[in-house]
Amino acid sequence: MQTPLFTTTPTTQYPPSQVKLLPLRERPAYRASSTPAACTSLELLAAVIGGPQQIETANALLAKFGTLRRLYNAHVNEIEGVSGVGAQTAARLKAALAIGLRMATDDAQERTVITSPADAANLVMYDMGLLPEEHLRVILLNTRNHVIEIVEVYKGSVNSSQVRVGEVFQAAIAQKASAMIVCHNHPSSDISPSPDDVAVTRALVQAGKLLDIGVLDHLILGANGAWCSLKEKGLGFS
């Protein structure tokens, strides 16, 4: 039997690309460019991912993480572990989600005058409500209650044994702030103040009086826009 001069290797058969089966006006990139507000999360993810398997990959991401919030908080290595997602695509996804969050934060920060606890909460809730662990930040204010800066002080458990009063006031002193609002998040979404929260607040209020930097409030932020003002509850400010 004569050996053939050429042999052929069967090629891998991929399922047909879903995006190519759609009319142009129904494809994610077209939808995202024309009516982004009407797009589903899947369509927005697919538009960012691009390529022939964008819909399949977006479906796989949502199947693994469930929500955009969980995708935002996921480590890049977890995202790269999804079939069809490489390092560049994972970076684009993280960047796109961060841009959306930054836009919401920037819109809030344009309202730079703080006249109520709600104003302060709106300034930080979009970001801090997404954080998977506790963070403590301070909103620094001038004499007219205009926002000077938002500074992160702690990442981790916020309790009376770990929070150093001097570190909380360090940025306020450096920026010559006249007042500040303390904010920290509860990843559990239970925004009820703990005894540690009240103790930290009391220590900061007393230190602020000595430093002539008013501690106007201490806000606890949860997920889905929930927040609590210790000042309004009279906890730590008496």
Image (spheres, rainbow, N blue to C red):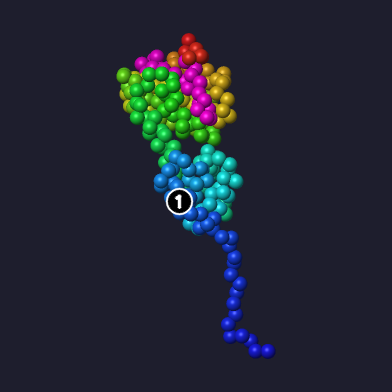
Residue at (56, 28) in percent of width and height? 189
Pick out the residue farthest to the right: 1
**Which residue is more in the foreground, 70 or 35?**
35
Pick out the residue farthest to the top: 238
What's the magenta region? 207-231
Residue at (52, 18) in percent of width and height? 198
Relative to residue 174, is residue 90 depicted above or below? below
Quadrant for residue 110, please give it. top left
- The answer to whether 220 appears left or right of 214 in the picture is right
Q: State yes or no: residue 209 in magenta.
A: yes
Residue 2: % across, % down? 65, 89
- The answer to whether 169 appears left or right of 57 in the picture is left
Disc 1 element: helix
Instruction: Name the kind of residue labelled 1 in the image.
Output: Arg
Could one spot residue 167 in this view of the protein? no
Q: How many marks?
A: 1
**Which residue is more in the foreground, 191 or 155?**
191
The N terminus is located in which quarter? Answer: bottom right
**Which residue is more in the foreground, 209 or 121?**
121
Residue 107: % across, % down? 38, 32
Q: State yes or no: residue 3 in magenta.
A: no
Relative to residue 215, is residue 109 depicted above or below? below
Could one spot residue 144 in this view of the protein? yes
Which residue position holds label 1? 25
Residue 20: % across, % down? 50, 58
How crowded pointer 1 is (Cα within 10 Å; few <14, some 14-19, many 20+) is rated as: few
- The answer to whether 2 appears left or right of 102 in the picture is right
Residue at (34, 23) in percent of width and height? 113
Residue at (45, 25) in percent of width and height? 121
Residue 115: % across, % down? 38, 19
